[in-house]
Amino acid sequence: MANVTFSSPKIKKDITVYATAGDCSTLLALAKTHKVPVEFECENGECGSCAVEVAILGNKQPMGVHLTEKEKTVLKLAGKITKQQIADSEVTDIPPPWRLACQFIVRNEDILVKF
């Protein structure tokens, strides 16, 4: 299981929830299940309203995190990630700091999500 900590000025204190290993639901679905107020509109990776900053907690090497084509396009156009960060994620599995909550699948690692 992974601990997912949500942090935002919109909530009184950080909220930590557990994501079940092997579950293929998105970070946005996890937030909605636990009533965490992550903003979203389309839920399809096209509008970018659910962009969140994701940091890996702990001293482990980050797991390879696949960016969808929609994420690459939307986050690059929004100025959240660079071409180099996209290349790094594809070649060396170094995840970029920004993701779309509606596209990001939670892996078996503890993360901090800022929104």
Image: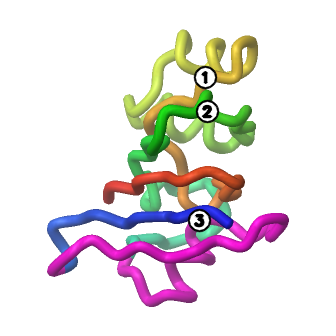
Residue 46 lies, in percent from the top left, at 60, 54
Q: CA distance from mark 2 to mark 3?
A: 17 Å
Q: CA distance from mark 2 to mark 1?
A: 7 Å
Q: Residue furthest front?
A: 59
Residue lying at 70% horizontally and 23% vertically, measured from the top left: 93
Span colored in magenta = 12-37
Q: Where 18 sits versus 83, above or below? A: below
Quarter placement of the C terminus = bottom left
With 72 as the anchor, is 82 left or right in this view?
Answer: left
Tag 2–tag 1 contact (CB < 8 Å): yes
The amino acid pointed to by label 1 is Ile
Q: Where 58 sits versus 105, above or below? A: above
Q: Which mark is residue 27?
A: 3
The 10 Å Cα crowd at callout 1, few under 14, some 14 to 19, many 20 or more, is: some
- Which of label 2 and label 1 is nearer to you? 2
Give the mark nearest the N terminus, 2 or 1: 2
Give the mark nearest the N terminus, 1 or 3: 3
Residue lying at 46% horizontally and 71% vertically, measured from the top left: 40
The 10 Å Cα crowd at callout 3, few under 14, some 14 to 19, many 20 or more, is: many
